[in-house]
Amino acid sequence: MIWSFSKMHGAGNDFVVLDGVRQSIDMTPERARALAHRQFGIGADQILLVEAPSHPEADFRYRIFNADGSEVEHCGNGARCFVRFVHEQKLSSRNPLKAEIATGLITLEEADDATVTVNMGQTRFEPEAVAFDTSDLSSTRDHDDTLWSLPLDNGDTVTLSLVAISNPHAVQIVDDVASAPVTVQGPLIEGHPRFANRVNAGFMQVVDSHTINLRVYERGAGETLACGTGACAAVVAGIRRGRLQSPVTVHTRGGDLNIAWDGTQITMRGPAVTVFSSEINIDRLVAQYRNSTAL
Ligand SMILES: N[C@@H](CCC[C@H](N)C(=O)O)C(=O)O
């Protein structure tokens, strides 16, 4: 079966985007892994699938698969690419658009300067919202936030803010993102047994009250050049901790994102870029991927 796709990125967080409205796409974890593989596939942090909605108020349903094949609740950089894709592929000229994600509806608007603004939906802070087991763990208060001290397997203890932007995030403040132990602590936090559904691990350096530097070790994808929901989670955590004021410019390794939070609504503005569009034989790709001796 031949699938048309676009290769896109939002601040360097890259995607294979598929139109499941005009073509029949049966996505499986293995197909997502094969498409996302950097050597044996097209290569992507996430696979995005645009489908017809089931919600009466939505224009489309927007589904997200991590590079490891897991289907997840939200993807901020992907949401911006989703709108650009829908407009470029002439699936709809509507602007703004409403998209159905796993936890509800999000609103997205493309601007004349080629940026996209997304109203990111609900924000929650209870440990249950990120499926975090707090039993016998110590916590402290920092302004409006609760910080959890989590011992890691390597002997480090990290101090985490918990934020769900539909998907789960654990954010810590570090002195310097360049030297932060992202690749050591990231996988230990991501796969910590206290997070029943794993978690995205954010490392935020506060530059001033309207600026942060951010790196995120993403659940199911490893460290990416940018994470949109991670940027939202970091900004919300920083505001709740009294370190930041809305709006905030988030410098990531792949570019800048602008995040605003009024205590209820969180919006993200940033770029969405199409690299190329092409076609792939998905059955042949998966067969080659299965036969690869290197995996
Ligand atoms: N890159 C994304 C987030 C993608 C999903 C995440 N890895 C998860 O598992 O929740 C973004 O831009 O938000």
Image: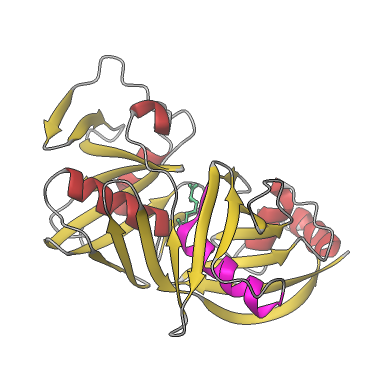
Q: Determine if residue 117 is in view.
A: yes
At x 63% / y 48%, what residue is drawn? 69
At x 70% / y 52%, what residue is drawn? 53
**Percent coordinates x, y for residue 159 in the rendering:** 20, 37
Tell me the chief SS of the magenta region.
helix
In this rendering, the answer to whether 195 lies above or below 89 is above
Quick check: is 84 in the magenta stretch?
A: yes
Quick check: is 131 in the magenta stretch?
A: no
Q: Quadrant of residue 85?
A: bottom right
How many numbered circles does the render carry? 0
Residue that protrudes farthest toward the front in the picture: 57
Is 105 or 132 nearer to us in this picture? 105
At x 58% / y 58%, what residue is drawn? 98
**Percent coordinates x, y for residue 187 in the rendering:** 39, 44
Bounds of the magenta segment: 74-90
Residue that protrudes farthest toward the top in the picture: 136
**Percent coordinates x, y for residue 280 in the rendering:** 79, 71
Q: How is the image coloured?
A: secondary structure
Q: Is residue 200 left or right of residue 210?
A: right
Is 288 or 161 nearer to us in this picture? 161
Image quarter where the N terminus lies is bottom right
Residue that protrudes farthest toward the right in the picture: 1
Q: Determine if residue 39 is in view.
A: no
Q: Is residue 17 left or right of residue 136?
A: right
Q: Is residue 39 left or right of residue 14?
A: right
Q: Is residue 62 left or right of residue 31?
A: left
Is 192 or 168 nearer to us in this picture? 168
At x 41% / y 59%, what residue is drawn? 227
**Percent coordinates x, y for residue 151 in the rendering:** 25, 29
